[in-house]
Amino acid sequence: MFSLAAGGWLGAGNDPTYNHSSCFNKFPFPSPTTSQITTLRALGEELDKHRKDRQAEHPKLTLTNMYNVLEKLRSGDTIEGKDKEIYQQGLVGLLKDIHDRIDAEVAAAYGWPNDLTDEDILQRLVDLNAERSREEAAGKIRWLRPEYQNPDGRAAQAREQGEMDMGIKDTSVKPAWPKTMPGQVAAVRDALADLGSATPEQLARSFKRGRAANVAPLLESMVIMGSVSKSSADIYKPTR
């Protein structure tokens, strides 16, 4: 979810791409207690063992098979046919239980409730990124593995995690992507006016179910009409 929002997009299909500097370096990891670290480590080992055991017993069973069925299970779809066989071979119900416990423990490590929506989680991660950025500017680094990254316990001298502008203002009131072309044009125009300048990806994130592939052609039309300008870095700004 965070990597989809922070990463890039590539190709005619507007496929998401993973960028290490944006998706990993800027991801605000939690600060778990020693007890939480122990619990998460045990859950990770349980997950690894479960998957390896199922694949050892059923050599043709793949992780893709198992997780496709898990996604259907979470969506409430009927598990039947080939999917039912995969469900039984992979003990996908147990796989779901392990992941649910991991999710709950990670939420606890962040100090968050366990029933947040994806949009709520993303907004909290963006807010936490900004908080961590301010901490690092002041010399406080929350090392992931301090025994390797900072064995001498030295205070940081420079910012290592940049604050992110992901084009998100308040996901709780994010409007849906309009269904009609006139509505889409007006929505993109108004969103760009609010942001001042933005890429198609940032504008798309201003809407529920917004996609950069749908926003970009509208922006190009506005450039032709003269109501929007475009920089060499594909950043768009209103001209009036």
Image: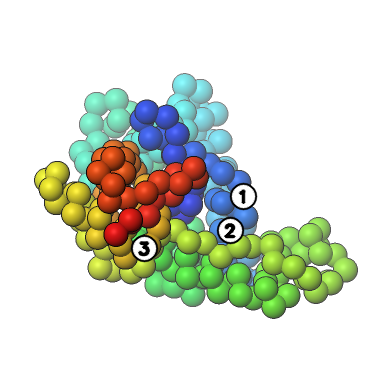
Tell me, yes or no, if residue 73 can be seen here.
no
Type of residue at label 3?
A: Leu
Disc number for residue 21: 1
Circle 1 — which element? helix
Cα distance in 3D space between marks 2 and 3: 22 Å
> What quarter of the picture does the C terminus occupy?
bottom left
Asked if disc 1 and disc 2 are in contact, CB closer than 8 Å, the reply is: yes
Furthest-bottom residue in view? 138
Q: Position of residue 91 (x, y in %)?
A: 40, 39
Viewer-nearest of discs 3 and 1: 3
Instruction: Answer with left or right where residue 31 lies relative to residue 58.
Output: right
Circle 3 — which element? helix
Residue identifier under label 2? 26
Type of residue at label 2?
A: Lys
Disc number for residue 195: 3
Q: Earlier in the sequence, mark 3 or mark 1?
A: 1
